Amino acid sequence: MDAYVLALTLIGLALLGAAWMPHLLARHPLTLPIVYVLVGAGLYALPLPLPPADPMRFPAVAERLTELAVLVALTGVGLRIDTRFGWRAWAVTWRLLGITMPLTILAGLWLGQVWLGYGVAAAVLLGAVLAPTDPVLASDVQVHPPGEGGEDPVRFALTSEAGLNDGLAFPFVWLAVALALEAAGEPMAWSRWLLLDVGWRVLGGVAIGAVVGYGLMHLIFRSEREPTLSGSEDGLAALAITLLVYGVAELCHAYGFLAVFVAALVMRQSERDHAYHATLDRFAHQCENLLMALLLLLLGGALASGILHALGWREIVFALVFVLLVRPLAGWLGLWGLRLPARDRWTIAVFGVRGIGSFYYLAFATHQADFEEAPALWAVVCLVVVLSILMHGLSAQRVLGWLDRRRRGRR
């Protein structure tokens, strides 16, 4: 059996399923990510000549596939947010970024060292890769497509957090890389980390995203007397915007993820009510679903191929504690004092989904430096993501539906 032809066939089935299965599963407790992980595990359990699903053997492939999925998702996230940008209007976002994420990173660092016995570099990396809310797998708890309205505090908080939290997580990923290189004999340059990885990469990402996004907004919406592109149903520009902004930011050594989200947000905020945003978002969402389907099949394949073999009972306890206690408590503390109903505060705190972004950060870091704990890191991150997919996937729609009914009842 030709492995290449078999792989193409399975990819075709995966893409067909990504388009068809959301409608089939609309009224069922199972979600698309759960189904794809199970299908991937089943396929890789069969004696078929499938490509190896091992991110440790192919770190560059894992890095690039997850990178593209996160990028496309961030474009959609930026385009969907209706709430006007402002310090007060986005207060919940700043709390999640400024309090919840640092607490989560510190908890991962402490548990990684004290409970799992990792070195400092691996513990910092563990906290950094598990801290961000994922923009790909968190789509069930995000805001509705552009122009549909009904943007509630819970969906807005989780969506805006997923868009911006890369700017805080990535500096700590770079810190873990620098610490691993120091352990290998390369001197640690704290000033370089502070000035470049924290300062310029964050501020440069925001600035480049804002400038390029504003320029693209004028090009698409205001440069023609009789608009042809923005009046069409061609959403390919969403992918062009994603790749262009990311490329410019990365060439300038800024955070491309942050730039892509800011560019999409600027385009939406500057030209709020144009119907073309829905077209761009629809195309971005389709690309996101296709990449997510492929990556989840590979995740299932990695599970069937034994990526969890490095787990011990301590790693299993860590994963449960992280999903069930660390993020919910850090989220609750971050939102303390805001004028939010307790049920909204708890929902935001609990539904910080871990996912494809965590895999990207881990693949990126292990491609940049050698981590002795890499097999254990991959195992525990995979377990945390699988637990998040199961727990959040089975409960998110029911909880958000209950919240929606409560809001309608108050009106």
Image (spheres, rainbow, N blue to C red):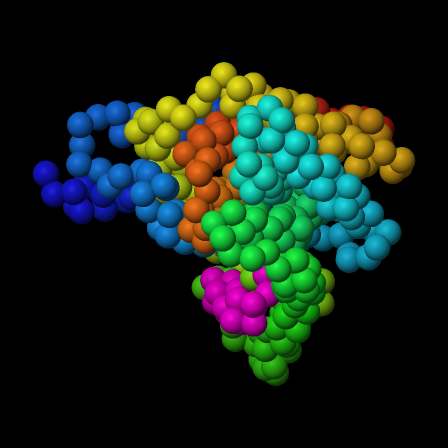
Place residue 398 in its image quadrant.
top right
Quarter of the figure that contains the N terminus: top left
In the depicted structure, whether residue 307 falls above or below residue 186: above
- Number of residue marks: 0
Q: Residue at x 49, y 44 (%)?
A: 362
Place residue 305 in its image quadrant.
top left
Residue at the farthest top position: 313
Q: Nearer the viewer, residue 283 or 261?
A: 261
Q: Residue at x 55, y 28 (%)?
A: 117
- In x, y percent, where is residue 226? 58, 80
- In x, y percent, where is residue 391? 56, 23
Magenta range is 239-255
Horizontal side of residue 103 vs 376, given as left or right: right
Q: Residue at x 59, y 61 (%)?
A: 255
Magenta portion: prevailing SS class? helix
Residue 71 in magenta stretch: no
Residue 245 in magenta stretch: yes
In the depicted structure, whether residue 157 falls above or below residue 300: below
Q: Is residue 253 visible?
A: yes
Quarter of the figure that contains the C terminus: top right
Q: Residue at x 77, y 57 (%)?
A: 85
Place residue 405 in its image quadrant.
top right
Q: Is residue 263 visible?
A: no
Horizontal side of residue 284 vs 294, given as left or right: right
- In x, y percent, where is residue 49? 17, 36
Q: Nearer the viewer, residue 174 or 372?
A: 372
Horizontal side of residue 248 vs 157, given as left or right: left
- In x, y percent, where is residue 380? 49, 29
